[in-house]
Each structure stands twice: as structure tokens, then as C-alpha cells.
């Protein structure tokens, strides 16, 4: 139907007669001459219709936005001064000699260039939203990146193997999506949260290097970087330790960024241990573009007559940290109140602060309601340790370490964005040596910080029996601009060690056999050492493209309430289907207000 795409129309085809197909992006009538911007997947080209051919001109007059048309015409130079350098065809135009309307379009439910349209409305008509050039560009980028990743891994000797989508529920952290079985009434499949167990079985089977770009499913609360179904680049290797895996995938990501967005990531990437990342940034996925850091001051405040500080300062599980904000003295009290409210989301009971009006004047040059509780020695230590200067502001967090890290870590990021402190570009790093477990005081039990198949640091194995909280894992995360793009670990390949870890996690032998029996059986038959990693493809594309949400880089995403406005899924099914699956639906009980 066409000889060229819109993106191929340039000076190279000057004076040639060509055929084009596409959509009417815009039609303009300029005093007897009609201009049509024809759009296809590759670009845009201007087509000019004059009245010399009345039939063609009459058809051109009837065109409206988003009509699908076929044009036959001759390529000519644009008149001097009318060139458009923003498009590939900007030096030329097509004189329309023939025109056919392939299909008409009703008026659109929204204008494609209207940025005020709600996301819900755009997702309802996603097939129209995807016509926007920025959406096409993002999905093109996605294709380019996944193609580059596949090619890199193919050349590195990896084999692409598909793993099952219908499997059994296993306790991996988030809730499973369940699928009822018709042939086994009352029993359910689960959609995989990851191919974790199967890729380990592939290593036991001797494949040595596996990868897969795969859909994963998690029934969890959503946010900008989460979807109920998401795409993962899954990698697993045999006979490689963490250093080997990290070196390989680091080079892969450097290659992908260089090819897709012409960005050179550092070689090698910087590394932080988990402990250092939490100490300096309050986060295990720190955004290094923000030049603000947390500073520990607990030792300066252990004896002050202010229990808000002295309590956590003397608590082994507590933390007192300071966050210096350069030129933060300009923040009005209303802004400080807003930040206090913000950190309360993370469990912080307040947000103490000191304004530094004159750093050289000591106590007299400071302004804060907490100064009366602090000794001169403590004040001097805080100013020295934080490096506070005249005009700065220092925020404090004092509570359990987890609360301080989460609240001040989030405040650091918010301040960075609010005050324009975020550097441009990409800052990637590795975070290593994560704790093996985290302890839940309320439940009185341990949880795996990554997953129950992560191997402990070899030097720390004896502490599994004596001090589990001190055990470091052989886990590693690839972090970029404050997002965890990928995470992985060396796996447990020893059956006895795997059972010991299950025991610490409160998984009994019976439960382990029920949930993971097939894996434990496999480990009996010559399982090799194995290590791997999984990258969130959606997050990679989101950051590369500058999108604000992974929904903007997925063709047909779900909303934040895990619904699809386009297909109206999830939806009810009829009684016959439910009966066939041996399911009876119980409507949720809505409590009436008293």
C-alpha cells in the first residue's frame, strides 16, 4: 500500500513520486490550499493539496483528525523559510496527486496532545493514548533495550528457557495470585512471583547459564514503580560467585545504557555495603544524585536531659541521626511543619531541628526549641560532625533505627527534590552484604530480607545458631537513582544449610516439605553452586525514558487499584463458570455506621 514511510521522506527522494499511508495528525486550510500532516509509526510528513484536481481536493477538504488515508504524491522542497528542523521530513513536502480515505474516525474522546487528560481516561482508551509520539518512543526504547539484553546474554553463552506460569503457591513475600483448578476441585495454581525455584532446578539440571524475560505476578499494594504483573529479566548461573555475576551484569548494563540512551555508566560501579548505605542515606537504595547525608550523633546525646534523644541514644536498637540542609534556614516554619507531617507517615513522632543563624557564635547563634536540653559539648559536636555552616538547618531523627532510617531517608529525598538539589544524569551503584534476616519484634520471628534461598556469608555461618541478626547474606542489589533495578544473591545449594535457614524462618520440616519438597529433593542429587539476579525491565525503561511511572512504559498497564479501565478487568463471571470450578463467591460484608 505504500512505497515509503513518513520517516523515509527526505531530500534523498526529492522529485520522486511516492505512496504513503497513515493517520491524519492535523489538517489546515490556508486560503484554497490544504495542508495535511500525515503520521505513521516512523514519523510525520506534510502533504499539500491544491485545487488543480477538484476530486482530490474535495476529498482532502473532508479529512479530519485520525482518519486513515493513502496518499500518492511527488516530493518537492519546501518553500524557503518554511522548513521544519524538528522532523526528518522537514526540508521537503509531498504534493498530493491522489488521495483515498481508508477509514474514518469519530471525534476522539480526548485530544492526543492534551496533557490535562486524567490517567484513568487515557487508560480507558489506551489504544488512542499509545498513538502519542512519546508513548511510541517509550515502547520503541523498551524494544531496543530488551533486544540489546537478549543479544548480550546470547553472546555470553546463556540459554533462554521458559518456566511455568501455572505453579504452586510458595511463601516468597507478597501475596500470590491464585488460579482455581477445574480438574482438581478445591485446589489452586498460583501465578509465579518469580521463576526462583525453577531457575535453581535448571541449574541442578546442568544448564549452567539461563535467562528469561518473563512476566511475574504479585498481589501487593501498588505505587508508581509497581504493577500486579511486571516484566523481569531473570538470570541464573552455575559455578559463579557474586563477584562473577556482578561483573557480568554490570558490563551488560553498561552496554545497554550506552546503546539505548548513549550514557556511559562508570567502570567499575561504586559499591556500598548495606550498613554504610543505611548509615549515610537511611536507605538500601540510595539516590546518589542528592548531596545530603545522615550523620550519627547518638554518642553525643546519651547523657542529655531529653528522653526523646537520650532514650534512643542508649537503646541498642535505637538511632539518633542528623541531616544537614544547606541554606535550609530560609525554610519557613510552615514548611518545617509540613516536613514534620511527612515523616510521621513513616512512624516518626516528630522532627526536631536547629537553625544555624551564626555558626561562629555557638549556642547564641542557633535557633531551636530543643537547645535548652542540649549541653554546649553536644551542640559543638553536632555542628562539627554535620559540618553545619551559617544559614544551614539541621533536622534530627530519634527512635528505633528502622523508623529513623525510613523517615530521614525519605525526608532526604523529598528535600533534594523540593530544594532543587538533585543532580542530572544517572548514578548507579551496588549495595552488598545485606543482613540475612530481619527480626519482627511484634511477631517475635525472623524474616528473610531477600528470600529464603539466599546463602549466608561463609564467615558468618556459625552465627546462624548464636546470633542470626548479625549474619550477612551473599546478596547484592543494582541501584540507580534511588530505585532498585535488580537484586540477586548466591543461592543455598546445600540441603542441610537450606533446612537450617528454613528453621530460623519458622518453616517447619513438614511445611518445607509441603512448599519446597521438590527443591529440597533436587538438592540431594549433586546440586552445583549457583548465583543469579533479576532486573525489573519496566523500571529500567522508566528511568531511561524519564517517565514518572512504570505505567507509562507498559503497553496495557493496570491502575493503582490493580484494575484495567480498557477491558474493565477484573470482572464478575457467571454462576456456571463458578460451579464448574467448585467455587462459591461470598460478597464482602459492609458494616453499617452506627
Image: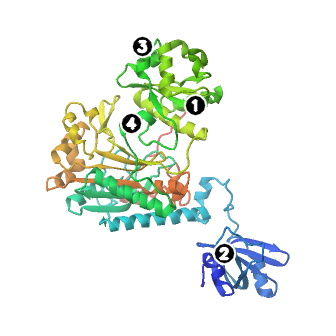
- The answer to whether residue 216 is left or right of residue 6 is left
Calculate the distance from the C-alpha at mark 4 to the C-alpha at mark 2.
Answer: 53 Å
Question: Residue at label 2?
Answer: 89
* Mark 1–mark 3 distance (CA, rounded to whole Å): 28 Å
Q: Are marks 1 and 2 in contact (CB under 8 Å)?
A: no
Query: What residue is disc 1 on?
Result: 339
**Mark 1 or mark 3, which is nearer to you?**
3
- Left or right of 516 on screen, residue 425: right
Tell me if 255 is positioned left or right of 164 in this view: right
Q: Nearer the viewer, mark 1 or mark 2?
A: 2
Q: Gap between marks 1 and 2, in whole Å?
A: 50 Å
Of labels 3 and 2, earlier in sequence is 2
Q: Quadrant of the C terminus?
A: top right
The secondary element bearing badge 2 is classed as loop
Instruction: Work out whether 155 lies above or below 373.
Output: below
Quadrant showing the N terminus: bottom right
Separation (CA) of disc 4 from disc 3: 26 Å
Q: Which residue is denoted by mark 4 in the rendering? A: 276
Q: Which residue is mark 3?
A: 303
**Which of the pair 575/521 is nearer the observer?**
521
Assess whether mark 3 and mark 4 are in contact (beta carbons under 8 angstroms): no
N-terminal label among 4 and 3: 4
Amino acid at each position: 500500500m505504500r512505497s515509503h514511510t513518513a520517516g523515509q521522506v527526505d531530500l534523498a527522494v526529492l522529485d520522486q513520486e511516492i505512496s504513503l499511508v497513515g493517520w491524519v495528525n492535523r489538517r489546515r486550510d490556508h486560503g484554497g490550499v490544504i495542508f495535511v500532516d500525515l503520521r505513521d509509526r516512523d514519523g510525520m510528513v506534510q502533504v499539500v493539496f491544491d485545487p488543480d484536481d477538484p476530486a482530490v481536493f474535495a476529498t482532502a477538504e473532508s479529512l479530519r483528525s485520525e482518519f486513515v488515508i493513502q496518499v500518492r504524491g511527488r516530493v518537492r522542497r519546501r518553500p524557503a523559510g518554511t522548513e521544519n528542523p524538528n522532523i526528518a521530513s522537514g526540508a521537503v513536502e509531498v504534493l498530493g496527486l491522489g488521495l483515498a480515505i481508508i477509514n474514518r474516525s469519530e471525534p476522539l474522546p480526548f485530544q492526543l496532545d492534551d496533557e490535562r487528560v486524567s490517567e484513568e481516561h487515557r487508560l480507558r482508551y489506551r489504544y488512542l493514548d499509545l498513538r502519542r509520539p512519546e508513548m511510541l518512543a517509550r515502547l520503541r526504547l523498551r524494544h531496543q533495550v530488551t533486544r540489546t539484553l537478549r543479544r548480550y546474554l546470547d553472546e555470553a553463552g546463556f540459554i533462554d528457557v521458559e518456566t511455568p506460569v501455572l505453579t504452586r503457591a510458595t511463601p516468597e513475600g507478597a501475596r500470590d495470585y491464585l488460579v482455581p483448578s477445574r480438574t482438581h476441585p478445591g485446589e489452586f495454581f498460583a501465578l509465579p512471583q518469580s521463576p526462583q525455584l525453577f531457575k535453581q532446578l535448571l541449574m541442578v539440571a546442568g544448564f549452567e547459564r539461563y535467562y528469561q524475560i518473563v512476566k511475574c505476578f504479585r498481589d501487593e499494594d501498588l505505587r508508581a514503580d509497581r504493577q500486579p504483573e511486571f516484566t523481569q529479566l531473570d538470570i541464573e548461573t552455575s559455578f559463579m560467585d557474586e563477584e562473577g555475576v556482578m561483573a557480568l551484569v554490570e558490563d551488560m548494563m553498561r552496554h545497554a545504557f550506552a546503546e539505548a540512551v548513549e550514557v556511559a555508566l562508570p567502570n567499575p560501579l561504586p559499591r556500598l555495603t548495606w550498613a554504610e548505605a543505611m548509615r549515610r542515606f537511611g536507605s538500601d537504595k540510595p539516590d546518589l544524585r542528592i548531596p545530603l547525608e545522615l550523620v550519627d550523633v547518638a554518642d553525643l546525646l546519651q547523657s542529655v536531659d531529653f528522653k526523646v534523644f537520650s532514650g534512643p541514644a542508649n537503646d541498642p536498637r535505637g538511632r539518633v541521626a542528623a541531616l544537614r540542609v544547606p541554606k535550609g534556614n530560609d525554610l519557613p516554619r510552615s514548611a518545617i511543619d509540613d516536613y514534620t507531617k511527612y515523616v510521621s507517615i513513616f512512624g516518626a513522632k516528630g522532627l526536631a531541628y536547629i537553625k544555624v543563624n551564626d555558626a561562629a557564635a555557638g549556642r547564641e547563634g542557633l535557633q531551636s526549641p530543643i537547645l535548652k536540653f542540649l549541653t554546649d559539648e553536644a551542640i559543638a559536636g553536632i555542628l562539627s560532625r554535620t559540618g553545619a555552616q551559617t544559614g544551614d538547618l539541621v533536622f534530627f531523627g530519634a527512635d528505633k533505627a528502622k523508623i529513623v532510617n525510613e523517615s530521614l531517608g525519605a525526608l532526604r529525598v523529598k528535600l533534594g527534590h523540593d530544594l532543587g538539589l538533585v543532580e542530572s544524569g544517572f548514578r548507579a551503584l551496588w549495595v552488598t552484604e545485606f543482613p540475612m534476616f530481619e527480626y519482627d519484634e511484634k511477631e517475635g520471628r525472623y524474616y528473610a530480607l531477600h528470600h529464603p534461598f539466599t546463602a549466608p556469608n561463609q564467615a558468618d555461618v556459625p552465627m546462624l545458631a548464636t546470633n542470626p541478626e548479625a549474619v550477612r547474606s551473599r546478596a547484592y542489589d543494582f541501584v540507580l537513582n534511588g530505585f532498585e533495578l535488580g537484586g540477586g544473591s548466591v543461592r543455598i545449594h546445600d540441603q542441610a544449610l537450606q533446612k537450617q535457614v528454613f528453621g530460623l524462618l519458622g518453616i517447619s520440616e513438614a511445611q518445607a516439605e509441603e512448599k519446597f519438597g521438590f527443591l529440597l529433593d533436587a538438592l540431594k542429587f549433586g546440586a552445583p553452586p549457583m548465583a543469579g539476579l533479576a532486573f525489573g525491565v519496566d523500571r529500567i525503561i522508566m528511568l531511561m525514558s524519564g517517565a514518572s511511572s512504570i505505567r507509562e512504559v507498559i503497553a496495557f498497564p493496570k491502575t493503582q487499584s490493580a484494575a484495567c479501565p480498557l477491558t474493565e478487568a477484573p470482572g464478575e463471571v457467571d454462576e456456571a463458570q463458578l460451579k464448574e470450578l467448585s467455587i462459591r463467591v461470598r460478597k464482602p460484608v459492609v458494616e453499617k455506621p452506627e
